[in-house]
Image: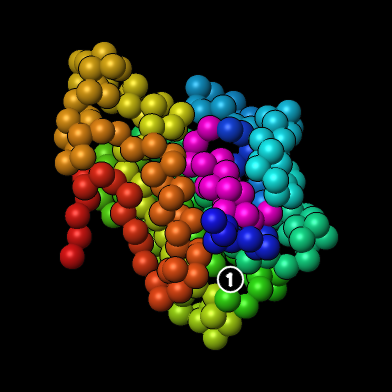
Amino acid sequence: MSKRLEGKKALVTGAGKQTGIGFAIAKKLAMEGADVIVADLVRQLDEKFEGYVRTSDADLMQETVAALKETGVEAYGVPLDVTDPESVKAMAAEVADKFGKIDILINNAGGSPGVSTLVAMEESSWLYNFDLNLHGPWRVTRALYETLNDGAGIVNVSSRAGKVPAAFQGAYCTAKAGLIMMTRIMALEFSPRKIRANSVCPGQIDTELGQWGWKMKAGAEGLTYEQYREVLASRLPVKRLGTPQDVADVAVYLVTDEASFITGQAINVTGGQLMEL
């Protein structure tokens, strides 16, 4: 059976370790025949976000690269801090050096550090959320625009939170909503080069980041973590929590020729939790 992305070159941000949505997308791309560069932080977040999800490091990234190479494709790891313009510039130069041109860009790097009410949130945390979730994808896309082949596909990983407000996550929700709008603008502005841009909006996905949030919410509702997981799954029409693979399947479909008539969309991957006309 032929692979849908044979000969294509892809970059996935926020995919430096073998957990979460980023790696699931990178692995799916590789299984479909695409050569992949994974780009991610190789250091931990600042102390002010202590207790937050552990990011990648150089060793984890190399393990990720090795796992991708096992599928038979080329794979590389590149350090990247999407909040640092110089890091983004260096990443873009390395991508051009390794691949020349790329056909697929997945802006997955993101997160929700600094959970707080709007009025109690420190300004530095508010701004960091926007730098990570909105400005980061903008920086990466701008830096790689000339490296993208005509007809390339872009997928920005937004969130259900970009469509449905959540208390204590105001910065994250607002930034992810901005990412959805930026995706639509990309679809318009990049259309002369036949570059398509879409976003995916995951809901309750069983990742380290999701688990981190669920543990806090479980305590707030007076439930154990396992009890909260069961309650959360029961609230979804499909009666189960989502997996990184659920998101990867949709994201990779959006960059195949089968989705050539789809651009500017924000696709919900929520198990029916969010339904829209």
Res. 117 visible in picture: no
| Residue 140 x/y as whole percent | 62, 59
| Residue 35 x/y as whole percent | 68, 54
Q: Tell whether position 21 is magenta.
A: yes
Q: Nearer the viewer, residue 67 or 206?
A: 67
Q: Residue furthest front?
A: 1
**Which residues lie in the magenta part?**
19-35
Left or right, residue 224 beside residue 86: left
Q: Which amino acid is tagged 1?
A: Ala
Res. 38 visible in picture: yes
For the C terminus, which image quadrant? bottom left
For the N terminus, which image quadrant? bottom right
Q: Tell whether position 33 is magenta.
A: yes
Q: Nearer the viewer, residue 163 or 32?
A: 32
Residue at (54, 86) in percent of width and height: 192
| Residue 44 x/y as whole percent | 64, 30
Q: Main secondary structure of the magenta part?
A: helix
Q: Residue furthest bottom?
A: 192
Judging by the rendered image, the residue that carries numbered circle 1 is 152
Q: In the figure, 26 relative to 61: above or below?
A: below
Residue at (20, 60) in percent of width and height: 276
| Residue 240 x/y as whole percent | 25, 33
Residue at (53, 32) in percent of width and height: 19
